[in-house]
Structures are given as structure tokens and as C-alpha cells.
Amino acid sequence: MAKKITNKIPLVHQQENKKTEQLESFVAQSVGKEMSSNTGVKINDDQNSLKAGDRGQTLLEDFLLREKITHFDHERIPERVVHARGSGAHGVFKVYEDMSAFTKAAFLCDPTVETPVFVRFSTVAGSRGSTDLARDVRGFAVKFYTQEGNFDLVGNNMPIFFIQDAVKFPDLVHAVKPEPDNEIPQAASAHDTFWDFISHMPESSAMIMWLMSDRALPRSYRMMEGFGVHTFRLINASGTSSFVKFHWKPLLGVHSVAWDEAQVISGKDPDFHRRDLWDAIEAGAFPEWELGVQIVPEEDESKYGFDLLDPTKLIPEELVPVQRIGKMTLNRNPENFFAETEQVAFHVGHVVPGIDFTNDPLLQGRLFSYTDTQLIRLGGPNFQEIPINRPVVPVHNNQRDGYMRQTINRGKTSYGPNGIAENDPHQVTAADGGYVSHNERIDAQKIRARSRSFFDHFSQARLFLNSQSDAEKNHLLDAFSFELGKVKMVQIRERMLALLAHVDAGLAAEVAYALGLSVPNISLTELNGSIPADADKASYTPEQVKESPFKSDALSMAGTVKDSVSTRKVAILAADGVDGKALSKVKDTLVSKGAVVHVIAPKLGFIISMDDTQIAVDESFLTAASVLYDAVYVPAGANSVATLEAEANAVHFLNQAFKHCKAIAVDKAAIQVIEASYFFKKLPEKYAAETALEEGVLVSEDPSKLSDLFAEMISRHRFWDRELPRKVPA
Ligand code: HDD
């Protein structure tokens, strides 16, 4: 009897939309199918090549062997020159209310329309196989499959960029990538060439504050903000243009891990972010972001003291509030990583009517780069026909042929104007949705130059620094000390100290102390290496704006959303003889609030509780690691407690959780386990429930009270403030 075959991949949550329906027609499912060659010939023996005798040479005639090996030999395509390491997901976007006052983009004007999206998150510097937890910017690229064609918002998790002009992009990337002689280091900016370049580029000052901050170490892709970075234009039906900055605000808040933790995760689970995104979607805990816009009327272009065209500047939210205009939900994992996540081709130049560009010189260069890179990466001009890249609306034009053409264009004409086909495909009026570029008035001389309105490189670096919490500032200081500590050439460290001194003398002095150096006095004219051959150096000197900037709370993660344990991973350390009731109470409470709870024991299989029930073990101390969890709980039960107290891995688990400022809860009867830790003696005398919320360590006799307080602690993410006064080895 034939096997029952389903053409569906057994995902827990299959979410369909117009794009996934379109993709369905390309899906192949081999369950129950006969094996065949690419020409459709059924294969009888896929185990042995065709030979001259069973011990003889393989015959050139073996077309099946040749086909199989040839295909294999050609399986790889070039990885992305930047953002090679990434993970993707499908989803949908819906606008909350009609935005037609600002834009005619249909998907932003109708709250009933659900637009399919495909999102790819990435690191920038590392290769395809590199760790997710590198200290790096994260890419946040969204393809909207709208009814007016594809719109790509190709952004990052930081709102500004390193450089002001695209002509410097290859230099930046050459500097940050592994050094060319030995290809070291992988996926890291902590090396000479990167800091050599930065030390000559004062315009990078604000961005390196972001890069050295915890923003470069996200807890999850699901807990990152996203930014379109450049100022774009929105154009409404009457042709009025407004400037716009795009934002993505994660509903789970913006959270990061500690640097030490990031480094350990890179060994324990280099796929940490990829797995986290995949698992959350499989579990139906769909990640959500609100789309935000900061809209600036054209007449306010010069209002803010910096140039809206300068991509090293953000618009503080206190000056122009972010309006939340819609929501994106990621609700479906890809079926095939290569076909979808690897072959997806983003481009800042993919816009729809109602969205247009500004003259930001970085954006202008990107408009060239993205198609160009797909031509080499995906092998030719027909990459838009790859299923993941196809729009969900019909495509008709006179472009033809090229490698791997899929479309069979009927008819004689591939030109226009034509009489034979009555001029079809025909152009479309603006009223009917034809794209019309904004008619900006240009009256200028052709010149290679930079506007002086781009020359203040320090105010926003200082604004960012001023806006950080004490813990965030300490992390930033440690990050500079780590990164510059990895730099071998002392003159590069010194140039960087001099540059930092122009941002903040205190920061420079503290980093200098860590490096065992003093801060040299190098003038801004000398520091700036980015000067044309014939230019007068002084005319390229950055401006030092002295007044101290205000504080922007939106730039700190301290005040982010902290109201949920949803998808947080919690470890319960236990062994035979555990108090099963206490364990279940805490586990059930957390699971009911959406947390993912794992029982971790000395070995896999089951443990037997003190009242003789079997409790399934999710991980052993060998397979689990503290850094892969957000919080840890130790239940009572004399035998379990005795085992854990003597188990170095359990004590290490707790020490690391403490070091990384995570919530720790312990039943009073299990106190010996934390007494064996490094941090126990560092705790204030009263570490009972009442003080728990400040310290993040909770000891309680009452499992009900403990489970509620523990949940509240976990939702606060981390207890960074205990880090310095209670530093522990781990
Ligand atoms: Fe870029 C990829 C984001 C500046 C040239 N970029 C790429 C991706 C993201 C960004 C998220 C990965 C897309 C994906 O997942 O496939 N890039 C940015 C942002 C920038 C930026 C936010 C500054 C605001 N990029 C930038 C410049 C240039 C490029 C100035 C060149 C002049 N970027 C590329 C590229 C990539 C790319 C070489 C590599 C792979 C690809 O495009 O498809 O064309």
C-alpha cells in the first residue's frame, strides 16, 4: 500500500500568506517519491558507479555519476561580501491607520491590508559559518511584498553608520574584515586594521560608541531595534514630500548579553541567535516589532543643527517623536535555508510609489551597490525570478534572456514603442500607480566635496555616551579597553585615545589607564585622515561643538520594556530526591507566563523526586551551559541539594549566572548550593525575598511567593547594577 504523503512540512505553526502561497508552487517534497536524475530518469542504483568490472575503473559514460558529482561541485555560491552570516523568517505587516497624509504607498494606507514580508537578520563582518555572538552591528533587512511591488527596508540595529560617503565603504569593510595576510581574526573588530582606519576617521566617532555598547551584543534578534538609518522621503498623492526615518521597535524590548557571556556562547552555541529565532517561531511565540516613523516636514530640514542627509546622525526622539504606525509579526520559518535565506536579494533601491530617496551620499552609493552585488552572488540578471525574490504582483517589461531565464515571454516584441503588440507592455500613469521620482529642484556645480554641515563628528557621540546608564557606560569602557587591548601597534592605540579625548576626556583617560598609556594630544586636523589630495587640510578639520548635549533616554536600553518572561529560558538545577512539588510550582508558573523551562540534572533521562515521581530531564550538565539561559532556580529536596552542592558544574552554573547578572532563585532548604558559590559571601546580609528584586538573588521558603517574585525578576532581564560591587570570577 502506498504511504500517505503530505506535501506540507510538519511545522507546528504554518502561517500562510500571498507570498508563502506563491512559494508553495516551487516546493518539492520527496517523501514517498521515486528517485530520478535531473532529466527525470528513474535511478536504479545510487550506491555504485559504473565500472569496467567490479574492481575496474569508473567509466566516463556514467551519466548519473557525472550529473551528481557536477551538481555537487557547483553547490556553493559566493557568500555576501558583508552580512554573510544571517537568518531569515517569513511574516506579515499591517499598518495601524491610514498614512495617506504623508505617503501614497498603498501598504501604508490601508489598515485592512496584510503585507507578506521576509526578514533577514545578520552580523556584518563574519563569514557564513561564524558565530552569532560577535561584537558587531546586526543587519535588519525587511522585504515587503506589497501590491505595488517589493519594498526593501535594508537597515541595521543601530541608527547611524560609520561613514558619510559610500566611496569609503570598501575601505571600511577591508579594514574590519580579517587581515589579508593571515585571515585573522574572524568576525571581530578587535584588531589593528579596523582601529587604524577608525583612528583616521573622526566621522566614525558616534558609530563606534554604538559599536562598543551593548547594542552590539543582542540577547536575541527578537530583542533588537531596527533602523533604516538614512533619511528617506515619503510622498503623498499630491506630490508633497516629507523626510522620514524608519524604526523597528521590538515588543519584547531591547536587551543584550554581557561580553564575557557572548564569548562563552560563541563556543557553547555559535548558532545561538539563529536557534533562538527558529525555536520561538516553531513554538508559536511569534516575534513582533512596531514600525515607527519620525516624520520631518521639508520646511524643517535645517531645524536641528545637523544635516538630515548625514548618515552618521540620528534624530533624537525627544526632538521628533517616533510615531508607531504598524506591526510586523514573524510567523513562519523558511522551508529551505539556501533557497530562501541565502538567495534573498535585498536592495535599498527597491521602493514603491510613495517612498523615495534623499541625497544622503551613503544611500546614493548603496543604490548602485546592491544590484551589482547580486549579479556576482546570484550569477546573473535574472535573480528577481528566484522564488523568494519574486514580487506577488505580475511583472511585464521588455527585459529578456540572460543566464537562467525562467519566464517564457510570448510574442514577437521585446521593445517599445512597438506597433505589433499595440505598445504593450504599456507605461502606467502616476494616477494608476506608475512610479514617478520626486521632482526635487537641483541647481549645483558638479564637484567632489563634502558639505560643511557634515563636519560635527562629536556631538552625537557625546549624546550617546551621556545617555547611557552607569552599567552601560562601564560596558562601553570595558569594550574599548578590550578592543584596543587587542590592537598590537601602540601608535594606533594612541591615535584612538586622542580621538576619544575629542569625544570625552574622562572616557579617554579611563581607557588609557586600562591600556597603560597616556592620552596624547593630537589635533583634529592631524587626526582626520580622510582628505582629498589637493585639499587644504584645515578646511577639512572637523568641528568641535563644545556645548554639552542633552540626554536622550531612547538611546539607553535601561528603560526598555521589562514586563514579560515570554520566551525567556529558565534552568532548573535538580537531581534525584528533588522536591517535585516546588519544582512543578515554579515551572508551571513560568510556563504559564510563556517562559521556556528546562530541567538540568547530572544525567539525561529522568530524576525521581522525593515523593517518587519521575521528572523528565531536558539537559545534562554536560549538554547545558549557564550562558544559554536567562535565569536559574534551585529547588529544595535534601538528596538533590546534597548532589548539587557537590557537583562542580552546578556551582559553576550558578557562579556564571551571577556573574552575568541573571535572576537566581533558591528554595531556602537548598541554600547550601549557593553557599558553595563564589558570590554567596558577596551578598548583603539580608538576601531574603524582600531584597531580591534589587539584587536579583531570591531565597524563599514559600514556592508560591518565590515563583511570582522570580517571574518578576526574570522580566527585568538583568541586574547590571550588582556587577561592579559584586564582581566574581566564573
Ligand atoms: Fe549594506 C548587505 C545594511 C551601507 C553594500 N547591507 C547589507 C545587508 C544589510 C545592509 C542589512 C544584508 C542584506 C541581507 O540580509 O541580504 N548597508 C546596510 C546599512 C548601511 C549599509 C544599514 C548604511 C546605512 N552597504 C552599505 C554601503 C554599501 C553597502 C555604503 C556600498 C556602497 N551591503 C552592501 C552590499 C551587500 C550589503 C555589498 C552585501 C550583500 C548584499 O548587499 O546583498 O551590496
Image (tube, grey):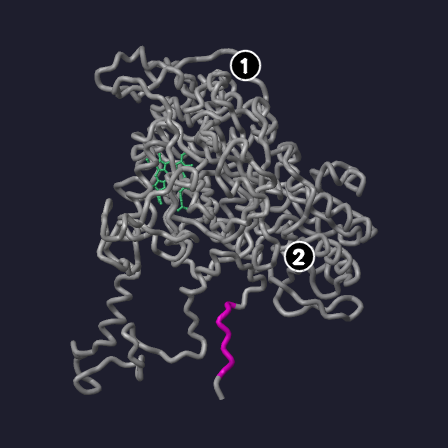
Residue at numbered disc 1 = 548
Query: Whole-percent x and y of residue 446?
Result: 25, 20
What secondary structure is the stretch in magenta mostly built from? loop
- Image position of 200 with respect to 685: above or below: above
Query: Whole-percent x and y of residue 62?
Result: 20, 78
Q: Nearer the viewer, mark 1 or mark 2?
A: 1
Query: Whole-percent x and y of residue 197?
Result: 33, 29
Residue lying at the far right of the rendered structure: 702
Query: Earlier along the polypeptide chain: callout 1 or callout 2?
Result: 1
At numbered mark 2, what does the secondary structure look like: helix, strand or loop? strand
Q: Is residue 5 magenta?
A: yes
Q: Nearer the viewer, residue 506 or 337?
A: 337
Q: Is residue 457 magenta?
A: no
Q: Residues within 10 Å of mark 2 (few under 14, many from 20)?
A: many
Give the quarter the ligand 1 occupies. top left
Q: Nearer the viewer, residue 15 or 651?
A: 15
Please name the residue shown 54% across and 14% down the image: 548
Tell me the amino acid under the disc marked 2.
Val
Residue at numbered disc 2 = 597
When asked about the image quadrant of residue 725, the answer is top right
Q: What segment is highlighted magenta in the picture? A: 3-9
Quadrant in which the C terminus is drawn: top right
